[in-house]
Amino acid sequence: MSTERGKRYTAEQKQELLELFRQSGLNASRFCKEMNLSYPTLKRWLGPAATKPVQFVEVGGAEPGEGRLSIALPNGLWAEFPLDADRSVVAGWIRELKAC
């Protein structure tokens, strides 16, 4: 498939590419490079659900300063933070890791 300006995809091609992306385990940028697909096109097809905000769940049982928060992302990257880390810092790191 080509990334020529104005390239048109049939509904079947679009659905096939979206399914391949979901099954690939790749991040959007890598998938687009491998499939020679425009990154903005894929993001548009995925819609706003693809950019949903980071959500946190309260987990009890540990005292402040104890333990670590481990996060594994679908793209294979992971990070560890102290449990008392600032939420906005953790959210920023997660967004950055997802973009890799």
Image: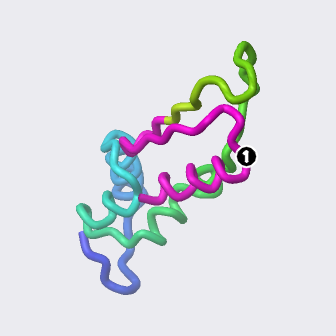
**Residue most toward the top?**
61
The foreground one among 44 and 33 is 33
> Magenta stretch: residue 42 in it?
no
Which amino acid type is shown beneath numbered disc 1?
Asp
- State the image quarter where residue 75 is shown: top left
In the picture shown, does residue 58 fall above or below 1?
Answer: above
Image side of residue 24 versus residue 100, left or right:
left
Q: Position of residue 4 (x, y in %)?
A: 31, 83
Q: Position of residue 62 (x, y in %)?
A: 70, 17
Colouring scheme, one of rainbow, by chain, secondary structure, one colour: rainbow
Q: Is residue 7 left or right of residue 48?
A: left
| Residue 63 occupies quadrant | top right
For image coordinates 69% across by 50% down, the residue present is 53
Question: Pointer 1: what residue?
Answer: 86
Front-lying residue, 96 or 89: 89
**Residue range highlighted in magenta:** 72-100
Q: Residue at x 73, y 45 (%)?
A: 87
Query: Residue 2: horizontal and vertical position, in percent?
Result: 26, 75
Q: Residue at position x 51%, y 38% from top?
A: 80
Residue 93 in picture, x, y percent from top left: 57, 53
Q: Quadrant of the C terminus?
A: bottom left
- Location of the N terminus by quadrant is bottom left
Mark 1 Cα shell of 10 Å, populated few (<14), some (14-19), many (≥20): few
* Number of numbered discs on residues: 1
- Residue drawn at point x = 40 percent, y = 84 percent: 6
For this orientation, the residue located farthest to the front is 65
- Is label 1 in a helix, a strand or a loop? loop
Comparing 64 with 78, the one in front is 64
Residue 25: quarter of image:
top left
